[in-house]
Amino acid sequence: MVYLSTFVVSEKRIKNPNIYPYNVFRTKEIYPLVFAPITIIYGNNGSGKSTLLNIIAQKINARGCETYAYGQGYIDKFVRECIFDTGEDDFGNALHIPKDSLYMKSEDILFEIKKIQQEDALERGYVYELMMQKGIDRQSAEKSFDSHENSFWSKKDILQFAQEKYSNGETAMQILIDAFVPDNLYLLDEPEVSLSPQNQVKLAEEINKLARFLGCQFIVATHSPFMLGTLQAKIYNLDSECMEEAKWYELENIRFFYEFFEKNRSLF
């Protein structure tokens, strides 16, 4: 399904060349982006792919879109100057942007993982505290925790979580999969950040299925070779001046990986 059919970023220019987000696109030749059920926004660091995805999210009012206290006036102005059009169903009827359209960044996923880790650590710490204070076994302490959960959460502000943990790729994968429902539009900014190559491929295959069979549309910002090579997607290359379409195997990132492994072929 294609809910968001086209998007055109603002072609207007302002005198100060450093004002965000005008500065991101000032050297680009602006053409309409025409979306498929899965579209990839590709680019190296600093190419503007995350900015573009957030601008789209703000324009369609997707859940999770970012706002900025500093310079918000320019961002709002830029967003107003952008235009988009929606797609049609199989019978030629105009579609609407789903009201629960979701914009999800890699930082959002990491934040959710950290919350889960923190809550788990606080719960275990409180259970241990009960054991020490009341001289009871863990099972009894856990039952006490369950019956006094509100009192635990009222204390959590004074409990400290000092142990840093690495993010859990399996948790990140579950957060992403749980977020997907049929007939919806998703804008994903580097969803692969916490995932192993195997899970990146698994996620891409899941996105393929959701787009093909369950009426979802995805716009994904990524430079992962595993996502690029697995997603059945149209790709826009933001490293080019025209933000032109490209095949995944033509992209600079992919060539870099290919040449690296070719150089070390003898080791395999």
Image: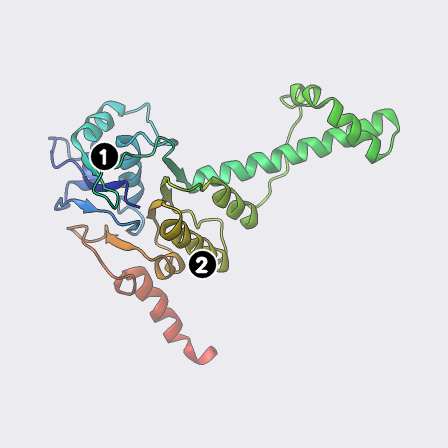
- Residue at the limit of the structure toward the front, as seen here: 91
Mark sitting earlier along the chain (1/2): 1
Residue at 75% across / 23% down in the picture? 147
Most extreme residue toward the bottom, as rendered?
Answer: 266
Residue 171: image x %, image y %? 56, 45
> Helix or strand or loop: what does disc 1 sit on?
loop
Image-quadrant location for residue 122: top right
Residue 116 % position (x, y) = 59, 36
Height in image: 141 above or below 251?
above
Q: Element type at marker 2?
A: helix
Label annotation for residue 6? none
Residue bearing the label numbered 2: 201
Return the x and y of residue 93 as percentages of the image width and height. 22, 38
Closer to the camera in the image, 211 or 120: 211
Question: Is 222 above or below relative to 108?
Answer: below
Decide if residue 137 is on the left or right side of residue 108.
right
Q: Whole-percent x and y of residue 261?
A: 40, 72
Residue 1 lies left or right of residue 160; in this view the side is left
Q: Quadrant of residue 88?
A: top left
Calculate the distance from the C-alpha at mark 1 to the C-alpha at mark 2: 32 Å
Residue at the spot 35% in from the left edge and 51% down from the top edge: 222
Q: Which residue is mark 1?
A: 21
Q: At label 2, which amino acid type do we have? A: Val
Q: Are marks 1 and 2 in contact (CB under 8 Å)?
A: no
For the image, the number of numbered tags is: 2
Q: Residues within 10 Å of mark 1 (few under 14, many from 20)?
A: many
Left or right: 156, with 86 as reference point: right
Instruction: Say which of marks 1 and 2 sits in front.
Output: 2
- Are there few (<14), some (14-19), or many (20+) residues within 10 Å of tag 2? many
The residue drawn where x is 40% and y is 60% is 226
In the foreground, 264 or 236? 236
Question: Which residue type does callout 1 highlight?
Answer: Pro
